[in-house]
Image (cartoon, rainbow, N blue to C red):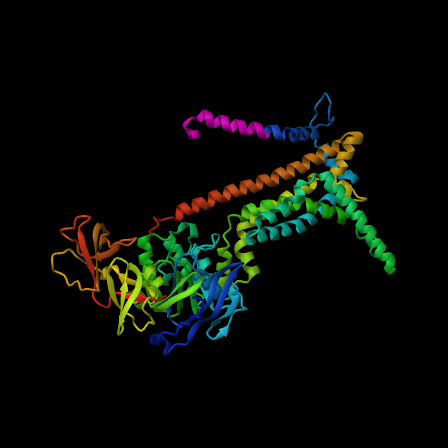
Amino acid sequence: MNQMKEIPVDPSTSTHSPAAVEVRGLTKHYGSVVALRDVNLTITAGEYFVLLGPSGGGKTTLLRTIGGFHKPTRGSVLLHGKDVGHLPPDKRPTSMVFQSYALFPHMNVLQNVGYGLKIAGLPKSQILEKGTAALDLVGLTGYADRKPHELSGGQQQRVQLARAMVLERDVLLLDEPLAALDAQLRKDMCLELKHLQEKVGITFIHVTHNQEEAMTVADRIALIADGELIEHGRARDIYRAPERKFTASFVGENNMLSGKVTGKSGSEVMVDIGTGETLKVDSRGQPVSVGDTVSLSIRSELTRMDLGNGKTDAKPGHSVSGTYDEAVYLGLTTSHLVNVGLDHDMVSRVVDDLDDLPQPGSDVRLYWTPGALRLHIH
Amino acid sequence: MNDYENIWVHRAKWAYLLLIVVTLMSPVFYVMYISFNLNGFGAAEYVFTWKWYGQIFSDRLLMQALRWTMTLAAMTTLIAVPMALLAAKFYKATDSKLLVVFLMLAPLFVAPDILGSALLVFFKNLNGSFQWLGDILGVSFMDSWFRLSFLTALIGLIIYTIPYSFIVILITMGRYRTEQTEAARACGASGWRAFWDIEFPQIRAGVFSACSFTVILCFNEYTRTSLLKGGFDTFTTVLVSQMLNEGMSEQSYAMSSFVSFLAIALIGSIILYTLIRAETISREARAKAEPVMST
C-alpha cells in the first residue's frame, strides 16, 4: 500500500488540455501521524475533480496543500507546470470555498465578494461591476447589501462561491462546501455547482465524504483513505467497476465477501466463501493463485432474490443460498436482507415492491448475472 | 424560571445588583463628594465649590506625577498590548495551549512586592554587570542603562500588565474563526492585510479594552513602580505618600475624583456605544430581513 500511485490523465480530457494541477510524491506528516503518503495526482484543466474518502483520510490535507495552507513534508505541487511549493496561498492561482461559511461578518455581501478585487487594487467601479456580476452568476441578485448573518446557509455558500469565482483564478478548491447544508439543499447545490463549473470552465477540485455528492458533480473521482490514494477514475467507473476492495466497500452499496481460491479455469476463478459454496468470478487479468485469500464484491442492486418458485435464472457458481431476514423499505427502493451464513447479511436492493414477502427464516437464493461479481486482490 | 413572570423577583435582582455596585463604588463617591467641599475632609459644614478643581493644575508635584504616570501608561500600553496580542495569536495557533497560558499568566501568581523586589535586585545586578563590562572595555555609556529609572519602571509595568491584556484579548479572539483569515489569504491578502482587514475589526473591542485596562492598571500600580521608578514620582506614589505623611490635600481629592470621572465616562461611553450599536444593527437587520428562503 506504500507504493507510488500515479493517476494517468483521463484520455477524454487530456487530449486538448494541459494539467492544471500536478501533485508529485506528496507526503505530509503531523508529528508521528502520516496524513498523506506518496500521493501522485494529475488534474486536467477544466476538469471537475472530486477527492472522496472517509473523514480523517487526508483529502482535506491534500486540498489545503494544493492551496498553500499546508507545507508538504516531502513532494511538490505544480500548478500549470510551475512548482508552487514555496508560495503562500495569496500568491497561488487558486481560490477556495471553505466548509464553514468563512464569510467576513463585518462586511456586507458585496464587500465580501469584492474583497479579493480590492486587494488586487481594482477601482471601485470595477469592483461593483464584477461583484454584481458574480452575485448574478450564483443567483444572489439583490442581496448585495445584506450582512452574512442575514443569509441562509445555502446563500452563504453561494456568496463564498461568488467571492472565489470573481477572482477568475484557474483552480477553485472546494473543501466540503455542502457539508453543513440540509439534504435537499445539498442535492440542489450539487447540480448548481456542476452547471456553474461547466459554465465558467475552470478547474474545480471538490473534497467530500459524500459519495452521492461526488457522483453528481465529478468528471473524475480520486478515493483517498488513510493518507493514500486508493483508486481513481471516472465517476461511473469507480461506481460500476471498483478495482480495490476499499473502493467497493466505500462507494455504492456492495455486498462484500471473502474467500480462498480453490481453482482456476482460464480467466475464471473459483472461490470458496466458507459457507460451503464456491463462487465463480472473472480474474480480469489479476494475478491470483490457488490458495490465495481474496475479496469479492457485488452491488446490491445487481443481486437478485430467488424465492424458490422456479421463475429465476440462478446458476451454479453465481448464486448463494440463505435464509430471509427482513425487508427495509427505503422509499424508492427496498432492501431485502438475507443471512447467507456469514457474519453479516447480504442485501438485494430492488426498485419494485414484492407483493408476497418471504417469511423471515424461509429459504431463498441470491443470484446475479455472470460478470456482476468482482474479484479484489488488494 | 422566567424573571418576567414575577415583576418583584425581577426588580429584587436589579436592586441587589445596584446595591453591590453602590457598595463597591461608595468610597469613590465619597471622595467625589469631599472634592466639592470648600472646607475639605472632616469639616462639619459642607460648602459646595469648584475651587479645588481649579487648583489641581497649580499643584506642580501632582501635575508632574500625573505627566509621568500618563507617559508610563502610554508607553506600557503601546508595548504591552501588541505583545499580548501576538501572544494571543500564538496561543490560537499552537497545540501547547496550557504551557502558553501558564507562561503568560505566571507573573500574576507572584505577589507584587516579591516581583517588585526581585526585579529591583535583578536590575541592580544587571546594572552592575554592565558597569563591570564598561570598565573592562573602557567605556561608560552602558553605566546607566539599567539604573532605576523610567525604563525599569516601564519594564516592571509591562510584566505586570501583559497577563491582563493577554486574557482580555484572548476572550474576544476566542470567537474569531481562523478560516476567515484563510479565506482572506485565498482572496490574495497578505498575512498582515488579512489581519488588519478581517481579524482586527472583529477583535478591536478586545484590543481597545486591553488598552483601557492597561492604562487603569498603570494608574493603579504602587508597589512595583515605587520600587523600580528611581528618582521620579508617579500619581499613585504621590497620593499614597501624601496621605501617609500629611493626609490628602483638597487638590488630591479633586485630582482623584477628576481621574475617576474620566475613567467612568470612558468606560460608560464604551458601554453606551456598544449598546446603541448593537441595537442599531439589530434594527437594520430586522428592517432588511425579508423571509429568508432556503434556496
Q: Where does the N terminus of chain A fall, quadrant-wise?
A: bottom left
Query: Across the whole image, how many numbered discs are drawn on residues?
Result: 0
Res. A184 in view: yes
Figure check: B61 above or below A340: above
Q: Position of residue B288 (x, y in %)?
A: 39, 49
Q: Is residue B6 left or right of residue B120?
A: left
| Residue nearest the observer in this picture, A347 or B186 | A347
| Residue nearest the observer in this picture, A17 or B216 | A17
Q: Is residue A41 magenta?
A: no
| Residue nearest the observer in this picture, A263 or A69 | A263
Res. B140 in view: no
Q: Position of residue A6 (x, y in %)?
A: 42, 72
Q: Where does the C terminus of chain A fall, quadrant-wise?
A: bottom left
Q: Position of residue B265 (x, y in %)?
A: 61, 39
Q: Which residues are magenta?
A: B1-21
Residue at point 52%, 27% (across, down): B15
Most extreme residue toward the left, as rendered?
A310
Q: Position of residue B151 (x, y in %)?
A: 76, 49
Q: Is residue A106 left or right of residue B121?
A: left
Q: Is residue B10 magenta?
A: yes
Figure check: B42 above or below B285: above
Task: State which quadrant residue A53 falls in.
Answer: bottom left
Name the chief secondary structure element in magenta: helix
Task: State which quadrant residue B1 falls in.
Answer: top left
Most extreme residue toward the bottom, as rendered?
A15
Q: Is residue B167 left or right of residue B279?
A: right
